[in-house]
Amino acid sequence: MNKTYFQRKIYSDIKEHLKSDDVTVLTGMRRTGKTTLVEHLLSEIESSNKIFLDLEKISNQEIFADKNYDNIIINLEQRGMTQKERMYVAIDEIQTTPNIASVIKYLHDHYNIKFILTGSSSYYLKNLFTESLSGRKRLFELYPLDFGEFLTFKNVTYIPLENLDKPGSFNVSEYDRLKAYYEEYIEFGGFPKVVLAQSAEEKRSILDDIISSYINIDIKSIADFRDSSAIISIAKMLTGRIGSKLDYSKISRLTGLSRPTVQNYIYLFERTYLISLVPVFTENQDREIVKAQKVYFSDSGLAGILNTIDSGAKFENAVFNQLRHKGKIQYFSLKNGREIDFIVNEKLALETKETPIESDAKTLRDLSKKASVESSKLVGRYQTPNFSDYLWGGSIV
């Protein structure tokens, strides 16, 4: 390929899945790099019997339009494919063709075809394929870059953090080397094209375009929501609640929309990757608030385009986007309001503080004991005197 390819962390798992007969499905928000990843994946397949089809092109949609599905094989053969060996068929933007699930099911069951599919909407894809391709698929989700991937796209070397709770000392030289990159990551997020853009103005312009496409194409194509102002209003309101527990009734009162309508919007926001909802850690149910979920945006830069966000909230959101790849993420809360921001894999407590101090570490240790969590660390944004419970946010790569 002529253009530079920066490998995503999920790439090796997807490549390994090519050995399986099951359908490979890649989904996520627009502009997260799904098409680029699949094109590169296809280029590495040691076979000439392969094809990439973008279903946003009408001519490619027509390949799958025949009601006699066996004739679709003829259409593929006219594009240079052969049945004499395994076919590799990569189909981009599958959400544009409503009947595609049944077509792929039939062809998968009757012909030697490895399908690699991409689409922009989790909600649409998960519902589309739940029954049609039950037991025949694996779904991979591609998010904006985490900080390690961000550095890769910047051609900056880094040492991966293999174990979040491993004891270690604060590395001043690494902090000095990477802090400007980390501040950029917090401010503008991890959409690949945004990361590669040179100026702040260009980055904001791309983020504006991403949120506009999301609202006007993705949301409106899968839901009967005609009022863009209501969509934007709720999305903006959620940015002001980053890291806070969701209160549907309060959002309903403030927006003038019914509670069920607010719930429907938030349901779609989550399933189309705009936001993530983090559940409470429920090991000690008698002490915890077990109902409310906390909200985070899939990308801190995107959240910042929607609304002005408190510096601490934007930092916490960036840390969440770094942690989502590390395993199961929950939060801990007591009824008196004391909380731990993140519980990772039920064994590590992490609390974000822009400039943490040792007394914060003591408070966190006490709360961790109440939560019956093995270990704890403060995650800081700015350089801090070295103590054992400290982890610089930029080291979570």
Image (tube, rainbow, N blue to C red):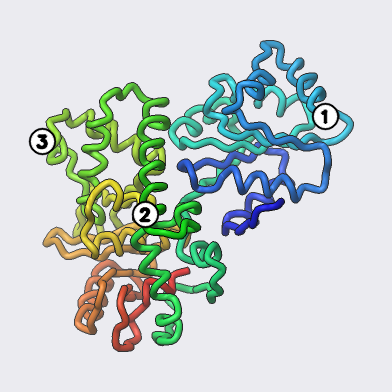
Disc 1 to disc 2, C-alpha distance: 44 Å
Relative side of 141 to 377, left or right? right
Q: Which residue is mark 2?
A: 201
Q: Which residue is mark 3?
A: 253
Which mark is first along the chain, 2 or 3? 2
Which mark is first along the chain, 2 or 1? 1
Residue type highlighted by circle 3:
Arg
Disc 3 to disc 2, C-alpha distance: 35 Å
- Badge 3: how crowded within 10 Å, few (<14), some, or many (20+)? few
Callout in the foreground (3, 2): 2
Tell me the element at label 1.
loop
- Residue 180, percent from left and from top: 39, 73
Callout in the foreground (3, 1): 1
Disc 3 to disc 1, C-alpha distance: 59 Å
User: From this viewpoint, is residue 328 visible?
Assistant: no
- Residue 167, percent from left and from top: 43, 83
Could you tell me which residue is drawn at 25 percent across and 77 percent down?
355
Tell me the element at label 2.
helix
- Badge 1: how crowded within 10 Å, few (<14), some, or many (20+)? few
Q: Which mark is residue 80?
A: 1
Tell me the element at label 3.
helix
Relative side of 319 to 128, left or right? left
